[in-house]
Image (cartoon, grey):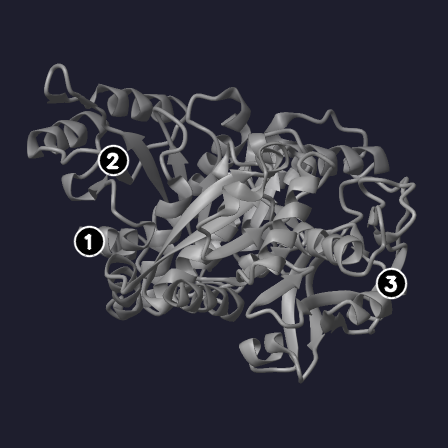
Amino acid sequence: MARFIFVTGGVVSSLGKGITAASLGAVLEARGLKVTMLKMDPYINVDPGTMSPLQHGEVFVTADGTETDLDLGQYERFLQSTMTRNNNFTTGRVYADVIAKERRGDYLGATIQVIPHITDEIKRRIIESAEGFDVTIVEIGGTVGDIESQPFLEAARQLRFELGSRQALLMHLTLVPFISTAGETKTKPTQHSVKELRSMGLQPDILIVRSDHDIPKSAFDKIALFTNVEPQAVISLVDTPTIYKVPEVLHEQGLDQIVVDKLNLECQPADLADWHRVVDAQMNPEHTITLKMVGKYMDLLDAYKSLNEAIVHAGIHTHTKVNVDFLDSEDVETQGVGLLEGADAILVPGGFGERGFEGKIATARYAREHGIPYLGICYGLHAAIIDIARNVAGLENANSTEVNPNTPYPVIALITEWTNEDGDLILRDEDSDLGGTMRMGEQECKLSCDSMTYRIYGTTKVKERHRHRYEVNDGYVKTLEKAGLKLAGRSLDDSLVEVIEFNDHPWFVACQFHPEFTSSPRQGHPLFKSFVEAAIRKREQG
């Protein structure tokens, strides 16, 4: 049976539970174990799909078409296993399913309570996610002490009791602050955090103590003594120059061996050669470029988490330091395209809504007219299409019906039906719910053999992930092709435009899908790698 590692956080939020948990998973994978991860989120939303990126960060899309927490992106970047709908659920999802069962009469008229009905549903989902794996790492969202996460913690307590210490352990992350005015490291917040856990019947087996300063041995001794955690199981995680060094840092302190011993796992020594290469390439670049990214959620860069990491990965695989200048598309509207001067490459990411969209269109035009490598993703494709329609094809006031339903030239429109890979006809209209009605998940794209995109990928068929409602209106494609647009990729049934290029341009690619979701530090992604290589050439040519 699978082993479980429950991961909690205390003292403050944003300690890096996801990165730490994923890094441990990466080291266990390097020891030959099959590892998966699960994120339990305490908010009431059924999923993050309709939540504001400025509050929640990006919505990560799994291959099976599920809108999930951004931590699942971290999991996929660190692990070799692919996440599914079983790897993330919220309090809202749990309650919705339990209430649906009660309405159907599944509970035979019983009074429905948090214990046992909610906790049983949580435990069922945890067990389900572990099927086929040696180790399942379960990250419990929120901070210990929050009322919202108590059902998850109680479910973890029950599972640890039911499975025993050889099959389930608890790893707790805390903050050990350094008070500069006193010149002292303070352990009291960690002590109180563990005390809170123990009041719920949970005793940590491992403590990961986060700090921006080196922690003295006396502090470790005090933490171990007052938390009842073995001294060797108190692991220091000081801020690192790159998150991809965390697996190495944890391994050097023997975290994986502690887990292997406590869970009685049989496995080989860890081979972290891939991670050594990643860190070395990132820390020792040979080139430097400036990338201008023009989006609408620049106040919270976690809104573009996967995209930012994909750019880092491209830098790793081209030995390049990519300096990203994040520009709000509204600023481009009000202050002009002069903000784009000095760019070696320009990227317009995905997004929704009217705000800042004209700035994205102006950005696409600037990149096209000045021969600057351009990558448009999702909404960045729409911006490029509208620019070509208005400014090259002469379709005055062309637009997307998402922004202007009355545009005379709806070059981007709500496509009401398409066929998925299973051959099923998918339908939607303007009145469809925003959540769960988009074209979603991994789908196959056919690339034209005479396209640059084909040469980049090296194959005629690629699988990438989608998350959108509006598409290129096929009725205008021939007109746009006469204006210089090159159709580089279509959906499997030929009904939808997936990738475009622009003739007589050194590197101009826009895609309907989100390639950032399939990029990883060890493998990179061909599209981002080629994009950065084009930027290097642009910089060298002046």
Where does residue 195 sit, x and y in percent of width and height? 31, 22
C-beta proximity under 8 Å, tags 2 and 1? no
Query: In the rendering, which numbered label is found on residue 476?
Result: 3
**In this image, 407 relative to 373: left or right?**
right
Mark 2 is surrounded, within 10 Å at the Cα level, by few (under 14), some (14 to 19) or many (20 or more) other residues, namely many
3D distance between C-alphas at marks 2 and 1: 14 Å
Residue at image position (45%, 65%) is: 80
Q: Does dot 1 land on a helix, a strand or a loop? A: loop
Which quarter of the rendering shows the C terminus? bottom left
The three-letter code of the residue at mark 3 reads Tyr
C-beta proximity under 8 Å, tags 3 and 2? no
Of label 3 and label 2, which has the lower sequence position?
2
Q: Nearer the viewer, residue 165 or 66?
A: 66
**In this image, 411 relative to 115: left or right?**
right
Mark 1 is surrounded, within 10 Å at the Cα level, by few (under 14), some (14 to 19) or many (20 or more) other residues, namely some
**In this image, 285 relative to 77: left or right?**
left
Q: Nearer the viewer, mark 3 or mark 2?
A: 3
Q: Nearer the viewer, residue 159 or 401?
A: 401
Q: Which residue is mark 2?
A: 209
The three-letter code of the residue at mark 1 reads Gly
